[in-house]
Amino acid sequence: MPLRSPLHEIHIELGAKFTVFAGYEMPLQYTSIRDEHLNVRKNVGLFDVSHMGNVIIEGEDAARLLSLATLEDANRIEKNKGQYTAILREDGTIIDDIIFLHLPDEKYALIPNAGRSEVVTNWLNDVAEKNNLDAKAEDVSREYVILAIQGPKSRDLLRKIIDVDIENMPLFGCDYAKVSGVDSIVSRTGYTGELGFELQITPPENAKKVFHDILDVGKEFNIKPIGLGARDTLRLEKCFLLAGNEFEGGRTPLEAGLSWAINWDHDFIGKDALLKQKEKGNYERLTCLECIDKGIPRHGYAVEKNGKIVGRVSSGNISPCLNKGIALAYVKPEYREVGSILEISVRDKKIRAKVVKPPFVSKDWAKENS
């Protein structure tokens, strides 16, 4: 039996169609994926992302634990700021990519991917024990609802119902706040590539009022509730990774295009393995492919050149903004030159696709297509 968000009954009232993802029954869409997708790009959307995890780390050595277990040196992340990073195994492969928030009271709040909070919590506690660190991770996922307000009008909306200054909150900034009078953790984070904020609310029943209030206040900004279908196409257009797809089979940050997230100036689990891989340089890398021919690339489809398999799609779909197929694929290094033409095997036919620079959709798309 799949788990359900504490807001499940509200989603039924809003006419949601549901899907099961990572053990949760969550809204797939309310109207259509395309309609919801474009509304986030041009206006604002409200997501229930309570299938995502929540892990709290406390203790004198909390920053040391995060620094050892992730690509980031947590000691350099000040209070009220956060960071995107990844947790690695000793061989350099990714256990999960996460965002952690350094809260004002010295706690760290981690947001693992759906279905990964228990694995992440156990891994962190094992690392703390092996290294005699005064730090403990606790999985509190079921105690929180996470709401995401995303889109160019998200700040205008949220400022009407929040009691802290979000006007100058930087990307990955965070704070405690009251939203519609309800205690929350607010962060300038999201999975859409647009201006956006996320709210973590406990206890879960308090989130019902906030959800309704956001939809009510958001009417003047053309808000819509958004399902997981549009969440996936939005992240794909911006080349954001989906853990179950992009890390399948054991991928390293170098392969997954996350070299920019590696802070090499500190020791972390998996660093030696990454240095060796970096020196060799002959590894597959995540590559952006924009389809020339009609067709929908999907996870697992082969990427070919002159009849030879040179890679495989990790994520693919139709881009609602571009009206064409797009894909992330792991491709051998010698076939990744921007402008190169490859072929994706889509069922019984091959469709041509061009290697392009990320992202597929620029930050100015909405202005240029208003």
Image: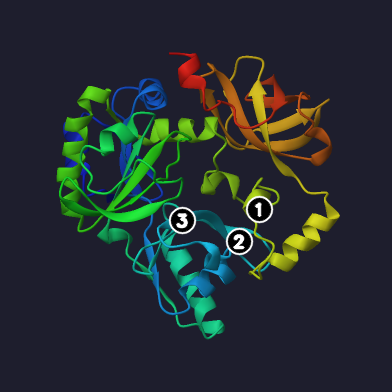
Foreground residue among 158 and 132: 158
Q: Nearer the viewer, mark 1 or mark 3?
A: 3
Q: Residue at x 15, y 49 (%)?
A: 181
**Residue at x 56% of width, y 44% of height:** 245
Would residue 320 be visible to someone looking at this image? Answer: no
Q: Amino acid at mark 2?
A: Leu
| 152 relative to 240, above or below | above
Question: Which one is earlier in the sequence, the residue at label 1 or at label 2?
Answer: 2
Across and down, in percent, residue 108 comes to 41, 65
Which quadrant of the figure has residue 45? top left
Residue beneath label 2, please?
Answer: 71
**Which structural element holds mark 2?**
loop
Q: Which residue is mark 3?
A: 82
Mark 1 highlights which residue?
253
* Residue at disc 1, secondary structure: loop
Q: CA distance from mark 2 to mark 3?
A: 13 Å
Check if mark 1's residue and mark 3's residue have beta carbons within 8 Å: no
